[in-house]
Structure formats: structure tokens, C-alpha cells
């Protein structure tokens, strides 16, 4: 059911004589909301899709950010349904991977208009394999069928954040955004537009000829830090400082490296380097821990389940990941309504 919206149509903007893209962010939470706010603060034409009290506060008082880029508030058109907000040239989809299929009806009109779709999910993305779908990410291939591969710009994001209160987002850590095409083509109009959009507002954005190694580098942390933090109810620092937990995290990362290698991706980042990178985040709550505390469904399947599915396909052994997967699924059944 759609709710009434405070609708203000995005107006064209011009920077350096060139028209800005009309941009929508579907899922204006910790990550999507920060992106939307940064783009809007720079004068881009941005609208957002959110839900519940977060949406109501954005409509009432604007979208506020506390971040390493400063503290500020922007006023943006907001709705719980993209179809209420008009047409867009670029749409960032920042809902969790297990929520992607339910928002496909909202994307239908922008996909049909030829818009660029930029999925921002954790885990293995639905577009990762050219000729098959992962059941843990895209059961039945419904997302792949709904969004043409040629309209997708893939993304791997390295930043941290949380919704402090409705309408208020806290961002911390680095702000690195890697983009690439599923086809592996090195340069393309859509890819260049997205990278320039981010670079022009002071975010560290790069185009990658092959985004798959970046997907696996991020998975090293997601497969280990996310589920273990939820199971132990710990932020990153105490996990790394406890020797047995540190050893477990290392084992999970080493198994993830083996799955990547079995699938044909050789990672230049070592497990030791990834653990050191995690140590810089100190007391940051992982997204799974945030979801657990908020009573939301966890991203177990697209992150952990998907790695097991790829491991099974290529014959890689992942006993520690299987154990964490079983425990995290059990935790979700018990703790998440």
C-alpha cells in the first residue's frame, strides 16, 4: 500500500554547463541515505525511497547526516514507492539483498525507460555469473530476468554507517566506492557517469575493469566479521582482540580465499592485510549486528549462503563457513521476528 508523500519533483541541475543526472536512491538507510545526502548537498537532483518513521522524518525535517564529510541536512523528495517520484536516469538500489525481489515492481518503469541500475548489496551480487543465478541470492533468476545486464553498473562499497534515529544517519570510516560493469568492459557511458557523479561530490570513486576481485575482497570481511559479530553480540575491536575469536575470523577468511581461487579469482589482498584493515574500524557495529539488534532479517543467504553455494559448485571445502552459516541461521530463527 502506498502512503501519501510530500512530493517535490526533482528539478534539473547544471554543473560546469552539463546537465546533472536525475538520481533516485531506493533504500535510504545507513549506506543509501548517506549517498543520497552527499549527492543532494552538491546540488544534484536526488529523490529517495524509505519506509516507516525514517521516511516520515525525512519528509518532515529532511535527511540529516553526521559524518567524516561534515554534519548537514538536505531536503529531498521522499516516498515509500519509487513510482510516486517520477522518472530517473540512474537508480541506486540500496535495500538488503534479501529485499531486492520485493522492490522489483517499483523498478519496472525506470528499467523500461533505460535507466542505469546500480545495485549496492553486500555479498555475491545477482549479476555475478553471466549464465546462471545463485539460489541464495536470486531464487529462480527473477531479478536477472527483470533487469537487463546491459543497464547494470556493479558496485562494491567500503564505508560504515547506521541510522542513529529516524531521519539521521551516522557515517564513519573510509568512503571508497568501486564500480564496474558485469561484462568486464573497461569503459562505458553508464559506468563513467556513475563514477563522475561520485567523484564530483568528493567521494573516492573508481572504475574497475573487473569488479569480481573487489567483491571477494569485501567478502573476506563480510563472511567473517558479520555473522560472528551477530553471534557474539560484539563490535569489531573486541572480536579481533580475543585470540580464539581472532583465530576463527582468520579461518573464515582463509576459506573464503579458497572459494575465490576455485572460482577463478586470485586475490592480491592477504588475510593478514584484511584483518589489519578491519582493526581500523575499532568499535564499529557490523550491518548484521545492527540488523539483529533492530529485529530485522539478517543477510545470511546473500553473504554466507552464497559463498557456500559457490564453494559447492567449484568443489571447495569450507567447514568453518558451514558451521557459522548453521549457527547464524539458527540465531535468526530465534532472535528475529
Image (cartoon, grey):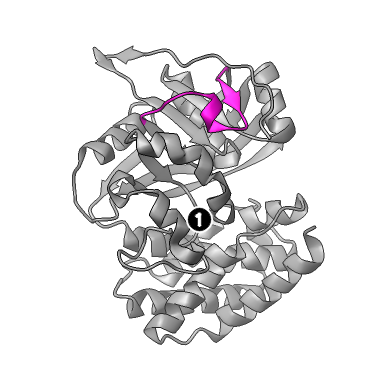
Left or right, residue 234 beside residue 138: right
Q: Position of residue 33 (x, y in %)?
A: 56, 34
Evaluate whether residue 76 shows in this view. yes
Say above or below: 94 vs 232: above
Evaluate whether residue 67 shows in this view. no
Left or right, residue 125 beside residue 243: left
Q: Residue at x 44, y 62 (%)?
A: 141
Say above or below: 174 vs 81: below
Q: Residue at x 40, y 87 (%)?
A: 315
Q: Nearer the viewer, residue 314 or 162?
A: 314
Is residue 78 within the magenta segment?
yes
Q: Nearer the viewer, residue 199 or 99?
A: 99
Q: Residue at x 62, y 25 (%)?
A: 64
Q: Nearer the viewer, residue 16 or 7?
A: 7
SS of the residue at dot 1? loop
Q: Position of residue 42 (x, y in %)?
A: 42, 19
Q: Position of residue 61 (x, y in %)?
A: 68, 17
Name the residue tied to disc 1.
122
Q: Which residues are magenta?
A: 75-89
The quadrant the N terminus occupies is: top right
Q: Position of residue 206 (x, y in %)?
A: 30, 43
Is residue 137 within the magenta segment?
no
Q: Main secondary structure of the magenta part?
A: loop
Left or right, residue 237 beside residue 181: right
Within-10-Å neighbours for mark 1: few <14, some 14–19, many 20+ = many
Amino acid at each position: 500500500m502506498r502512503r501519501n508523500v510530500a512530493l517535490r519533483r526533482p528539478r534539473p541541475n547544471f554543473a560546469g554547463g552539463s546537465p546533472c543526472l536525475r538520481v533516485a536512491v531506493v533504500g535510504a538507510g545507513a549506506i543509501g541515505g548517506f549517498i543520497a545526502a552527499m549527492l543532494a548537498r552538491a546540488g544534484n537532483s536526488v529523490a529517495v525511497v524509505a519506509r516507516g518513521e525514517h521516511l516520515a522524518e525525512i519528509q518532515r525535517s529532511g535527511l540529516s547526516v553526521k559524518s567524516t564529510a561534515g554534519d548537514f541536512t538536505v531536503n529531498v523528495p521522499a516516498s515509500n514507492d519509487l513510482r510516486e517520484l517520477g522518472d530517473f536516469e540512474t537508480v541506486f538500489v540500496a535495500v538488503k539483498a534479501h529485499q531486492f525481489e520485493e522492490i522489483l515492481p517499483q523498478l519496472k518503469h525506470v528499467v523500461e525507460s533505460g535507466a542505469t541500475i546500480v545495485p549496492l548489496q553486500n555479498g555475491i551480487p545477482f549479476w555475478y555469473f553471466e549464465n546462471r543465478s545463485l539460489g541464495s541470492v536470486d531464487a529462480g533468476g527473477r531479478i536477472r530476468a527483470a533487469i537487463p545486464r546491459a543497464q547494470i553498473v556493479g558496485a562494491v562499497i567500503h564505508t560504515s554507517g547506521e541510522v542513529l534515529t529516524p531521519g539521521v544517519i551516522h557515517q564513519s570510516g573510509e568512503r571508497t566506492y568501486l564500480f564496474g560493469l558485469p561484462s568486464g568492459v573497461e569503459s562505458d557511458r553508464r559506468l563513467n557517469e556513475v563514477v563522475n557523479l561520485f567523484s564530483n561530490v568528493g567521494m573516492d570513486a573508481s572504475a574497475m575493469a573487473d569488479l569480481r576481485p573487489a567483491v571477494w575482497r569485501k567478502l573476506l570481511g563480510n563472511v567473517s566479521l558479520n555473522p560472528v559479530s551477530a553471534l557474539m553480540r560484539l563490535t569489531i575491536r573486541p572480536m579481533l582482540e580475543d585470540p580464539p575469536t581472532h583465530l576463527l575470523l582468520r579461518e573464515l577468511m582463509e576459506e573464503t580465499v579458497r572459494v575465490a581461487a576455485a572460482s577463478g579469482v586470485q586475490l592480491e589482498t592477504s588475510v593478514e592485510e584484511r584483518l589489519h584493515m578491519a582493526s581500523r574500524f575499532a568499535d564499529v557495529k557490523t550491518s548484521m549486528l545492527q540488523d539483529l539488534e533492530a529485529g530485522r532479517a539478517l543477510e545470511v543467504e546473500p553473504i554466507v549462503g552464497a559463498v557456500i553455494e559457490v564453494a559447492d559448485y567449484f568443489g571447495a571445502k569450507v567447514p568453518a563457513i558451514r558451521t557459522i552459516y548453521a549457527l547464524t541461521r539458527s540465531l535468526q530463527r530465534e532472535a528475529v521476528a
